[in-house]
Image: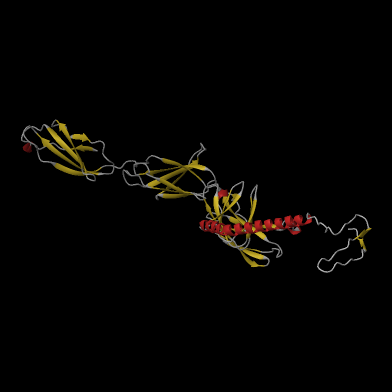
């Protein structure tokens, strides 16, 4: 800002003017500065370091050898200048890039427009340029899974400020899936597929396949798909074999500059189950399955079949399929299992004792039988036996209790044992 003033009239000088005190104050911050200008003939001064588009008060006080004269004060607005940097730049990137920014902290005037430029980060070609008066903008028609350099700068009536540049990557198409998917049985030969809407989707594809691998019909025509427009969230799938069981999955497709990009399919589910998914990163997601049925999951190396009685969470990798209970009942199940095992311990000990007792009793019986077989029977001395059939004379037996009587010897035939 250049300040100039007229000389003091002769009748008001009270002597020769030897200099001037020039004081300027920023009205916004109430900050004042004073400059001593020597020499009565110096009646112009250039103020520097002022803030553009800001009101200042400027006062001039002449002085001579004896005293200071009265002050003369004016209010001046500094000119506009180019704006400062955009303070922040944010982005949200599902299928396109939306940028949001804050105005410059030092506008240096009235912001008239914002200029936006963008191109692929690996490109050396010209930028795509567009303008807006808002502090947000949506950039569409970008290539998926590609990094872009995006810049924004502000304009005043004097000209543009400096660019603030950031790099952002568009979403990876294969990581974008419908976050809700369910199959409802409609009839013996038809089902209704229901899914959540994905912004920017051009169409959805529902795939189905028979779970009966031995079926001759499956090898012929029991796999298929149905395509539904991107503005729909449900569709009827008919012509199914009532004697077969089916698994269903869905994928989301996008049309970018005439090129169709299809996302990955969801996990296959049978009718009656509800599948919900949450994107954790650009390469993985958490899938929750609810219902009460049997569902088969397969990866490159393993196949797992489990009955779904509670809400389950499936974390997929390229090596295995893991089913994790996400209902908060894991601790309860573990506690009940431990309690059941502890309660069974006494019963197991009793059973072991009974088995040992029966074993010992059986052993004693066998030993007794063996001892009985080893007993040697001795004949009475009154008998004499031979190994062959012979006649033996039995000596007479005398009865000592009565009168002595002689019994005639008798011959007996002793059988050979």
Task: Identify which residue is drawn at 6% across, 38% down.
Answer: 11
Compared across the picture, whether 1 is left or right of 219 comes to: left
Locate the N terminus by quadrant: top left
Front residue of 48 and 85: 85
In the rendered image, the residue lying farthest to the top is 39
Task: Identify which residue is drawn at 88% across, 63% down.
Answer: 396
Q: Position of residue 280 (x, y in %)?
A: 51, 50
- Determine which quarter of the picture holds residue 26: top left
In the rendered image, the residue lying farthest to the front is 403
- Image height of 374 relative to 36, above or below: below
- Determine which quarter of the picture holds residue 195: bottom right
Locate the C terminus by quadrant: bottom right
Task: Identify which residue is drawn at 57% across, 58% down.
Answer: 346
Front residue of 215 and 137: 215
How many numbered marks appear? 0
Q: Position of residue 202 (x, y in %)?
A: 57, 55
Compared across the picture, whether 116 is left or right of 407 comes to: left
Q: Position of residue 339 (x, y in %)?
A: 54, 58
Residue 326 in view (yes/no): no
């Amino acid at each position: 800002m250049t300040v100039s003033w007229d000389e003091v009239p002769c009748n008001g000088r009270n002597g020769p003017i030897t200099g001037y005190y020039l004081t300027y104050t920023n009205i916004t911050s109430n900050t004042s500065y004073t400059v001593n200008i020597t020499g009565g003939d110096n009646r112009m001064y250039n103020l520097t370091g002022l803030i553009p588009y800001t009101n200042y008060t400027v006062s001039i006080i002449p002085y001579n050898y004896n005293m200071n004269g009265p002050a003369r004060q004016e209010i001046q607005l500094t000119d506009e200048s180019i704006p400062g940097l955009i303070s922040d730049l944010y982005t949200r990137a599902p299928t396109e890039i939306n940028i949001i920014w804050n105005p410059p902290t030092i506008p240096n005037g009235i912001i008239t427009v914002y200029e936006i430029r963008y191109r692929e980060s690996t490109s050396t070609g010209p930028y795509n340029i567009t303008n807006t008066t808002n502090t947000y903008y949506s950039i569409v028609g970008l290539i998926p899974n590609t990094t872009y350099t995006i810049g924004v700068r502000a304009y005043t009536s004097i000209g543009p400020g400096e660019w603030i540049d950031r790099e952002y990557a568009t979403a990876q198409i294969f990581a974008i899936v419908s976050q809700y998917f369910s199959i409802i049985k409609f009839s013996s030969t038809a089902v209704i597929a229901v899914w959540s809407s994905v912004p920017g989707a051009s169409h959805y594809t529902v795939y189905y396949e028979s779970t009966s691998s031995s079926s001759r019909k499956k090898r012929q025509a029991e796999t298929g798909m149905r395509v539904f427009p991107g503005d729909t969230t449900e569709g009827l799938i008919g012509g199914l074999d009532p004697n077969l069981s089916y698994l269903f999955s869905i994928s989301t497709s996008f049309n970018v500059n005439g090129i169709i990009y299809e996302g990955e399919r969801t996990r296959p589910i049978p009718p009656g189950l509800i599948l919900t998914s949450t994107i954790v990163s650009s390469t993985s997601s958490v899938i929750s399955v609810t219902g009460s049925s049997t569902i088969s999951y397969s990866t490159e190396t393993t196949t797992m079949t489990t009955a779904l009685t509670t809400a389950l969470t499936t974390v997929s990798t390229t090596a295995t399929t893991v089913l994790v209970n996400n209902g908060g009942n894991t601790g309860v199940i573990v506690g009940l299992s431990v309690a059941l095992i502890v309660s069974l311990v006494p019963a197991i000990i009793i059973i072991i004792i009974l088995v040992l007792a029966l074993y010992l009793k059986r052993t004693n019986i066998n030993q007794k039988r063996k001892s009985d077989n080893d007993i040697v029977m001795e004949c009475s001395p009154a008998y004499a036996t031979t190994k062959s059939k012979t006649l033996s004379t039995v000596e007479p037996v005398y009865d000592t209790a009565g009168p002595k009587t002689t019994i005639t010897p008798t011959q007996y035939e002793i059988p050979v044992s």
